Amino acid sequence: MRLRRTGRVPSDARVRHYDELDDDEQGVVRELAGEPWTAPETGDLDDGDVVKFTDYYLVRSR
């Protein structure tokens, strides 16, 4: 899984706010936000979801 900063949120995307995520998912978002790293997929974040953290981040699964 990767996060990519996005300036626009697709109309069909599920938007998740950082504080709605469980502790493990919050840790992954903190680790990946703004970095070119990948992490294992988490249970509740799917490809195409958008996470509102410091900016909007598009979730990409490999």
Image (spheres, rainbow, N blue to C red):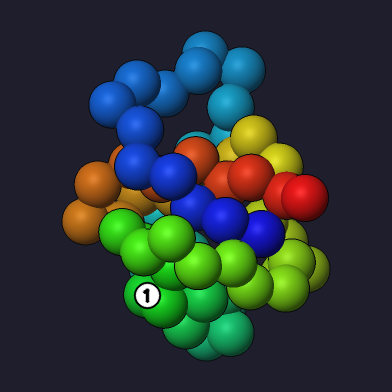
**Residue 25, image x, y percentages:** 56, 74
Determine which residue is flagged by label 1: 30
Image side of residue 1 versus residue 59, left or right = right
Q: Which quarter shows the N terminus?
A: bottom right
Query: Who is closer to the viewer here, 19 or 38?
Result: 38
Residue 51, x across and y down, in percent: 45, 49
Name the residue: 77% across, 50% down.
Answer: 62
Q: Would you identify the image quadrant in which residue 5 lies? A: top left
Instruction: Note whether 50 is above or below 26 in the view shown.
Output: above
Q: Secondary structure at mark 1?
A: helix
Q: Residue farthest to the left?
A: 54
State whether residue 29 appears in this view: no
Mark 1 residue crowding within 10 angstroms, few (<14) / some (14–19) / many (20+): few
The residue sitting at 31% across, 59% down in the picture is 34
Relative vertical location of residue 57 with respect to residue 39 in this rendering, above or below: above
Residue 48 on image: x %, y %: 64, 35
- Residue 24 pos. (x, y %): 58, 84
* Amino acid identity at mark 1: Arg
Q: Is 34 displayed left or right of 29 in the figure?
A: left
